[in-house]
Structure formats: C-alpha cells, structure tokens
Amino acid sequence: MIDKTEPTKFILDACCGMKYMWMNKNHPNTIYMDIRKEEKGFNKNRPYDNVSPDIMGDFTNLPEEIKAKRFKLIVWDVPHFKARKLTGNLLKCYGGLNPETWQSDLKKGFTELWNVLEDYGILLFKFSDYHIKFKEVISLFPVNPLFYNITNTSGKSDTKWFCFMKIPGSEQLIAPNQNSASQVVNDEHNISLKDNSNELSQISSNDETSLNNNIMFNSDKALVGMEKQDGN
C-alpha cells in the first residue's frame, strides 16, 4: 500500500518492468509501478530477473494511490511492440501494445501521467521505432517534447528518450491542425525515421529471436561494463 502523504516519494516509474535502467533498483524516492508481477524464472534467459513493482497499475487508468500524489519526475518506458499475445521470451519480458488500441492507450497514458506531474516537473518518455514510427507516437500527445536523445541505433530501429516539462499553459503550444511534434523528430538535422510499417507490422518468430538475442547481448555487455566499474 502506497502512503498518499509520503513526501519523499516524488519519482514515479510508470512501467518499471525488471528495472534494467535503474542503478538503484530500490531507490528510496521512487514508486515503481507495473501492470504485472512476475516471479524469478519467468525469463528463461535471465533466471534471476523478476518484476516486482511497489504497486500494480495500468498507466491508462492510474490507481487512486497514484492519482492522489504529485511527482517531480516520471519515467515512462512503454512496450515498443504491437502484439495481441505475449508469446515468446522477448514479449514476455518487455510486454506489448494492443494493435487495435495503442493510440488511445498512449493518449490516455500521457493524460493520466500529466495529471499527476507537478508544475515544472519532468516526464521522460522512451520509445523504439521497431513497429511504430516516432512521429506517429509523439503526435498523439498535446505537448511538444523539449528535446530528445538517441540511446540505441540498430539496422532495424532507433531508441529515443523524449523529455517533456509541465510548463503551465504548454498544452496550448500546439494548434489543433499543427503537427509540430512530428516536425521535431523529422527535422533535417536529425537522423531520418525509418518506415517499418509494412516490413515489421508483426514480429515473426525469426525476427523475435534475432532481436531478443541482440537485446540480451547488448544488455549483457552493459552489465559487464558496470560490474567492471564497480570493481574499480
């Protein structure tokens, strides 16, 4: 149970999963939320991993304990793939977006999280364009990101972090017929977006195996590097 009045919990991870990004996976100022819990062993490639949120919740309809609070920082790392069923190790680990409702789900999610973000708070949104182009996602939101950062580039997709700040009145920065958020990610000075809509409309078993191996390999390399740093 989350203490609604606890002032030290001012960070929310709205899709914490296995907390891979976190240096401290039990950060004292953070509430970790996910739509599910998983025991150790659910991921055959990482038998010691689990999904252990502080609170179970859906970002499209936040729990009352979360709605009662206000956060200075929200991390929103949603699933990046469209999938009806979580079959295969990759989707079991990272989840999937509903192919029919992903647009409305992300719209609702942004609104829900924006409502619990305090004024001048930061929302960090992470996404990969493996299945859905960045401009299709960012154009769903009523506010432009301040900037973005590319964290991973592969032959099939890019991964980007988008930074939003809740500046009072910023919801009016985008006219109803203006797709300025798309212009941000399509700027000629930025890396061009890939059109994967036809080739990658569904994850085939071969694609999933290849992508899963690539993710696990890069993740393992990062973990080894961190372990070496810790050893020093």
Image (cartoon, rainbow, N blue to C red):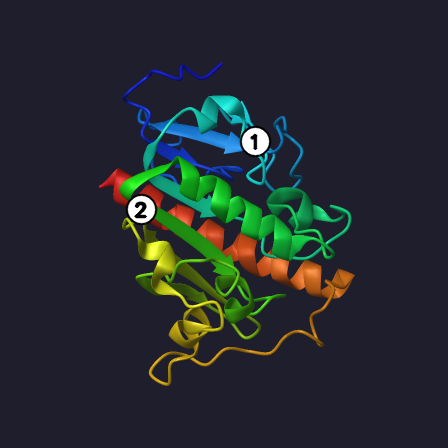
Q: Residue at x 40, y 58 (%)?
A: 143
Q: Nearer the viewer, residue 59 or 96?
A: 59
- Say left or right for 31 vs 210: left
Considering every residue shown, the one lying at the far left of the view is 232
Give the crowd class for mark 2: few <14, some 14-19, many >=20 residues within 10 Å.
many
Q: Three-letter amino acid code at disc 2?
A: Ile
Residue identifier under label 2: 122
Counting residues from the start of the chain, the first of labels 1 and 2 encountered is 1
- Say left or right for 152 vs 199: left
Report the mark closest to the observer, 1 or 2.
2
- Say left or right for 41 vs 16: right
Q: Please tell me in which quadrant of the rendered image residue 230 appears.
A: top left
Gap between marks 1 and 2 measured at Cα? 25 Å
Residue 159 on image: x %, y %? 47, 63
Q: Three-letter amino acid code at disc 1?
A: Val
Q: Residue at x 67, y 74 (%)?
A: 197
Q: Residue at x 31, y 46 (%)?
A: 122
Q: Please tell me in which quadrant of the rendered image residue 11 appears.
A: top left
Query: Visible in this render: residue 141?
Result: yes
What SS does tag 2 mark?
A: strand
Residue 35 on image: x %, y %? 60, 33
Q: Which mark is residue 191?
A: none
Q: Nearer the viewer, residue 76 or 121?
A: 121
Residue identifier under label 1: 51
- Give the tally of numbered discs: 2
Give the crowd class for mark 1: few <14, some 14-19, many >=20 residues within 10 Å.
some
What SS does tag 1 mark?
A: loop
Q: Quadrant of the C terminus?
A: top left
Q: Is residue 218 above or below residue 116?
A: below
Query: Visible in this render: residue 20?
Result: no
Residue 36 on image: x %, y %? 62, 31
